[in-house]
Image: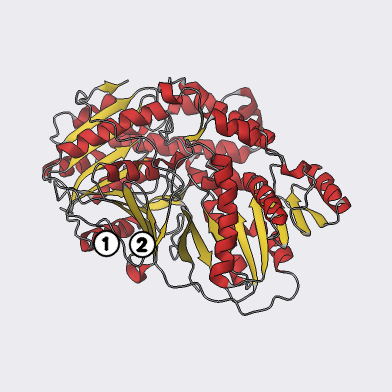
Amino acid sequence: MKPTPVVFEGCFGWLHPAEGLRGVVLCGPYGYEELCVHRAWKSFAERLAGAGLPTLRFDYPGSGDSAGDDGEPDRVRAWLDGVKAAIRRLREDTGVTEVTLVGYRMGALFATAAAQELAEEGQGIDTLALLAPITSGRKAVRELQTLSAMVLRPVCNPEPPERASWLNVIGMPLTPETALTLGGLDPCDRPVLPAPRILIADRPEAKASMKLATRWRAMGAVAEPMGVSGMIELIQQPQRAQAAAVFDPVLNWIAAGPVASGATPPPDRPAGLMMPTAVERPIFFGAGSELFGVYCTPVLADPAGNRPAILFLNSGATHHVGSGRATVVQARRLAARGYASLRIDAAGIGDSPDRPGFPDNLLYNKEVMGDVRAALNWLEEQGHERVVVIGLCAGGTPALHAGLGDDRVVGQIVLNPGRFEMGTGIAVSELMRTVAFRSTREYLLEALKPARLRASIRKPARLTGLARRLAGRFFRKVLLRTGLTRHALRMFRRLSAEGRRVLVVYSSGDMTLAEFYLHLGEGGRALDGLSGIEVVYLDRSDHSLTVWEARDRLDRMIDRHLASLDAAAQTDPAGAELPGWDLGLPSGGLPSGGLPSGSLPSGERVG
């Protein structure tokens, strides 16, 4: 049975149906770690359902596709209530008589605290499984602080006054109030058993799992530590679905023993999320209607009418919410200004199925253009005849190609595009080993550092790989400079000739600029004089645009670009009411946004 999108109490989730009366609720990691594990976590849910266990995975309030924002007050309370609401929803929709709650990393902290509250309320769960758990709020805050310092400190960007005291954790906010409350969360030291049967799965060398199991055994639980390798590695970069094999020992433990059948299939009620200025609903599109997206529309009809819709593409292998949840925030901000949008997952990424014959998470794969065309077709069926396509990094390349020969695409906004060609695709891990994003000089300086040089001498295959990549880089540069291949320039010239309006935004000093200059000259000088093509450099910004102050400046650029397109707003695509939908009520309003349009000098640096 296919998974079903669900909405409950402002949370968005997926119910993976099965026949067993033992149900599972998955509490995933938080923030950047969730982005990395999202596809493997989805596959884990599918494997649990395949073992006969109805499974619900969901986004915490204020994160992912759920309503609200993590800058709002009472976040810890909202997260715990979200876990409890997910358990209620699983029981109501399937009729399961047993519930296993699974928490991964910070999700383990939330799962333990929520399970204790349910036990005190007389509605306790049957089984708790903690995976690589963060066992206290104090440790959670410390990890978030470390992650923020590692990633954003080099940018040294002043934030707006209202957010000056907030911690930017790769785009996700942690307010002082949330940090204080989270730091005081310590469920593993409370004298309340979270469940009668508990699994603590962690690295084989981890000692904390043994101590925790011993403590809960003394309180009367059947508590079992389990050594599982590979779970920490899953949260370091976006993973393929196959990575879910790491969780197989946990799956076998959860599914062990007889499981009665008789769970009911989920009710047929389309899910929709109503917010103050936007309405969102999950949609399926493409051949067989299997590709996934989220359609976001204004609550009120736009009086101007006929505004273009916005199509958001995946940024690299990150699923449709975007780095630091930027795509969700941008879609809802634009809905408040009267724009409908669709954020999608291409095949092999996020919540869309595999692409037959290809591994997951391939970047710069020309096959993705079929998914983009399918999304444009779907938007056209909804009455959107004019579309602006937005893509970050590897999403910028298909965004550019989308406008070639397709008059439905009236504009594109590409952010830090890494390449301009599309081929058979390249994996994320392989891309980071190539020289595509760095100059030859930078790459050699890195490779010739003493530690790396010693490692390469010990492993001759590394030197061979380095020589092969540098030779490939040199060959490409010769081809470009001798004019034998000018693909990028020809593409921009065609877009200009076809009347597209293209905004290219690069973070100043970004790693992708080397490729841009290689194709189009220093500063992109080959684009000078091309009508409709604008290149802007965004100072004090990181590659994924997770610095809030830089995002604010980007918002103004996007607003200006959209305002420059002909013909005003779309005709009421949503309306104010959605009869028959399952409308989840948000716990709070939208994040503040909707900054007024600014006036930026064309082609200049924005600082």
Q: Is residue 479 left or right of residue 452?
A: left
Measured as percent of width and height from the top left, residue 557 is found at 26, 32
First of labels 1, 2 by sequence position: 2
Pointer 1 with pointer 2, Cβ within 8 A: yes
Q: Quadrant of the C terminus?
A: top left
Q: Which residue is mark 1?
A: 378
Q: Tell me which residue sits at (78%, 59%) in the image.
A: 196
Foreground residue, 44 or 65? 65
Foreground residue, 603 or 359? 603
SS of the residue at dot 1? helix
Residue 356 higher or lower than 386, as above or below: below
Crowdedness near tag 1: few (<14), some (14–19) or many (≥20) residues, C-alpha within 10 Å? some
In the rendered structure, which amino acid carries the disc numbered 1?
Answer: Trp
State the scheme by which the image is colored: secondary structure
1 or 2: mark nearer the eye: 2
Q: Which residue is mark 2?
A: 283
